[in-house]
């Protein structure tokens, strides 16, 4: 990776180095009066005027200091063309020439400088002939004045990155121990340095680079005159690779509600309806966001319309359902709405998970798939052969078999434990590319779901950034004994229980919040790895808790909920706060890092605006 803009040094460091550069530059003008050896040492070479190749490198460079005076001595090349001059390179770090890079204008092999500013320097010499410069001599590190350190610096911390196309911006926290520069290391696998090892030449704690497409494992070390620190935390950079997450329904799950949905429904004659199933999305591709709501009443039969509200020029929303929908079913109690391009026409289609009447005996309901038709500009229901009535509390969509089409995962629980003889259970709908779905119940482990309500949340996200979608399943922990399981994808089917990770429970485990209601997989601390933020609720839906799981290395998570957002468990505001069904993670304050907000529940009027801002390190503070 090569820097594309300059990095500013500390001013004192900059002045010292600049002073040294001026001294060396002045010596060029005084070249005839430099002290020189008496004649050239024995040299088996070709006269410079006849030289057609580069000279060999000078050898045995040494540096001696006396106060502020510095003397460089070296041996001429032992073979090759006779140098006509030498090139002096000096820098603030190994291999750098950011402080001096000039020709001596002489074949002398000694250089003396006085009044050199205090500091540490790295110097090399190259032989110069008519054909060009040789490779460098050995490099010598030396110090003028007292050494400003007694030990190497400590390792940098909190290394983070932002990748935009091929541009990478690295940031980190400054090390203690007065580092003069930092060393960037990048490899093709964890711990490797086979791609680049480069000194920044500066004490600045940011670095901008352009990198070819690929996956990079990056660390930073601090350096001073006493040595180099150990490595920082390692981050993963994905540069120039298509993100499979952009084709999933998850891409829309972090959209922020543009208005109070409950008040919008009430003002349009749908007060008292449930409206958990909602999407904020540009349906028709005109650049204007629509609000899609699947509403329902707490009654046994179908009662809920699917509505579309269009943003007007004055910022308000008006009912535009008839402009968008053709044949649309009435739903019972829709729980979740997802969007993705199922028929390949470039417009988002819709799928609604409907768990039906939410009281015993929990009879369930039929989910609904709506596909767009560009010719008519409307969305109509598409039947799914073999679809069964079930208690579907969640759904998610993505290309699970890597064939370029978007498939659907439906929770589909029943009042009994799933068995091979029970066809009503969590399943996939495999897409032929035009929106024709085939029910597939045998490509996930039989126990992915559970008894009615056992599977409450699910998302298809490439959590470990290996290019394949993973199935993240959230459960009703009180009855299932599990909170979240990640079934790791590998681009082929089926998913397997042997290729799965159950994420850690909160520490300390809060039994009052056993149910995982929503799942977000975002990089909260800028280390390039997706972390998990889970919305957990009480059994009676009377509070809320955010579980924060940091992905410290691929597929390995630690619970850091208390330190990153909760604080003291007994004082957590969610102990007594009203619950909500959804969280979203989006950049709410424009600093480039994801913050945390909520989508309020159907029963909460007026909707609350609860937000927790990220401090750019993955620690969240509530907005008053």
Image (cartoon, rainbow, N blue to C red):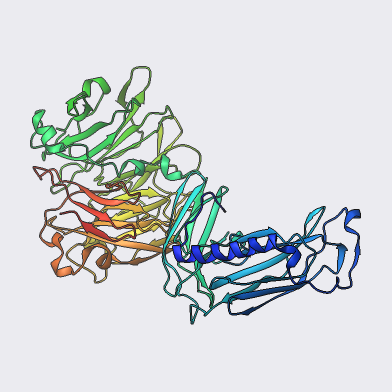
Q: Position of residue 27 (x, y in %)?
A: 67, 64
The residue lying toward the viewer, choosing from 124 and 364, is 124
Residue ID at (31%, 48%): 425
Asked if residue 86 lies left or right of residue 43, the reply is: left
Q: Position of residue 451 (x, y in %)?
A: 25, 55
Asked if residue 125 lies left or right of residue 606, the reply is: right
The residue lying toward the viewer, choosing from 411 and 538, is 538
Q: Position of residue 35 (x, y in %)?
A: 75, 72
Residue ID at (41%, 54%): 463
Q: Quadrant of the C terminus?
A: bottom left
- Which image quadrant is residue 108 in? bottom right
482 to 432, vertically: above or below = below
Q: Is residue 417 visible?
A: no
Q: Is residue 235 visible?
A: yes
The residue lying toward the viewer, choosing from 118 and 217, is 118
Residue sitting farthest toward the top = 375
Residue sitting farthest toward the bottom = 150
464 to 164, vertically: above or below = below
Numbered marks: total: 0
Q: Position of residue 88 (x, y in %)?
A: 69, 63
Asked if residue 369 lies left or right of residue 235, the reply is: left
């Amino acid at each position: 990776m090569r820097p594309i803009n300059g990095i500013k040094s500390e001013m004192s460091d900059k002045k010292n180095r600049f002073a040294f550069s001026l001294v060396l530059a002045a010596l060029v003008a005084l070249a005839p009066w430099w002290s020189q050896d008496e004649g050239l040492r024995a040299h088996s070479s070709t006269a410079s005027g006849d030289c057609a190749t580069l000279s060999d490198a000078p050898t045995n460079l040494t540096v001696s200091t006396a106060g502020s005076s510095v003397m460089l001595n070296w041996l001429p090349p032992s073979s090759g063309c006779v140098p006509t001059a030498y090139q002096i390179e000096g820098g603030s770090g190994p291999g750098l020439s950011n402080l001096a890079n000039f020709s001596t204008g002489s074949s002398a092999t000694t250089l003396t400088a006085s009044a050199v500013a205090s500091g540490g320097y790295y110097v090399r010499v190259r032989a110069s002939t008519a054909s060009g410069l040789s490779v460098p001599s050995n490099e010598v590190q030396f110090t003028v004045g007292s050494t400003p350190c007694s030990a190497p610096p400590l390792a940098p911390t909190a290394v983070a990155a932002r990748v935009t196309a091929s541009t990478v911006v690295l940031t980190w926290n400054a090390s203690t121990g007065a580092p003069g520069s930092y060393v960037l290391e990048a490899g093709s696998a964890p711990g490797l340095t086979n791609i680049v090892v480069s000194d920044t030449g500066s004490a600045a704690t940011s670095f901008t680079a352009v990198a070819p497409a690929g996956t990079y494992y990056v660390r930073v070390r601090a350096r001073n005159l006493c040595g180099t620190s150990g490595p920082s935390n390692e981050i993963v950079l994905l540069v120039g690779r298509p993100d499979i997450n952009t084709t999933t329904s998850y891409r829309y799950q972090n959209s922020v509600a543009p208005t109070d949905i409950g008040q919008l429904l009430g003002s349009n004659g749908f007060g008292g309806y449930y409206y958990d199933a909602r999407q904020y999305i540009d349906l028709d591709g005109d650049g204007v966001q629509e609000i899609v709501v699947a509403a329902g009443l707490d009654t046994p039969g179908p009662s809920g319309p699917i509505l579309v509200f269009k943003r007007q020029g004055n910022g308000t929303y008006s009912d535009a359902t008839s402009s968008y929908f053709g044949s649309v079913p009435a739903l019972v109690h829709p729980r979740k709405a997802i969007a993705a391009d199922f028929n390949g026409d470039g417009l988002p289609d819709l799928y609604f998970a409907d768990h039906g009447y939410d009281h015993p005996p929990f009879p369930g309901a039929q989910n609904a798939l709506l596909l767009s038709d560009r010719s008519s500009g409307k969305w109509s229901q598409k039947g799914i052969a073999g679809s069964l009535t079930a208690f579907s509390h969640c759904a998610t969509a993505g290309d699970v078999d890597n064939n370029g089409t978007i498939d659907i995962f439906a929770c589909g629980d029943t009042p009994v434990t799933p068995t091979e003889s029970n066809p009503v259970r969590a399943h996939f709908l495999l897409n032929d590319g035009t929106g024709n779905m085939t029910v597939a119940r045998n490509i996930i482990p039989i126990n992915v779901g559970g008894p009615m309500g056992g599977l409450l949340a699910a998302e298809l996200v490439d959590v470990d950034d290996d290019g394949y979608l993973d199935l993240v399943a959230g459960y009703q922990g009180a009855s299932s004994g599990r909170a979240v399981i990640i079934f790791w994808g590998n681009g082929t089917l089926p998913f397997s229980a042997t290729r799965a990770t159950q994420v850690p429970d909160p520490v300390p485990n809060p039994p009052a919040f056993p149910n995982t209601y929503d799942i977000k997989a975002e990089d909260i601390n800028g280390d390039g790895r997706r972390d998990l933020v889970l919305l957990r609720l009480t059994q009676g839906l009377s509070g809320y808790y955010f579980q924060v799981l940091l992905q410290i290395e691929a597929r390995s998570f630690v619970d850091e909920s208390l330190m990153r957002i909760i604080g003291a468990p007994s004082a957590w505001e969610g102990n007594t706060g009203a619950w909500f069904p959804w969280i979203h993670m989006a950049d709410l304050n424009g600093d480039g890092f994801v913050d945390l907000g909520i989508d309020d529940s159907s029963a909460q009027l007026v909707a609350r605006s609860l937000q927790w801002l990220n401090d750019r390190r993955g620690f969240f503070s509530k907005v008053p």
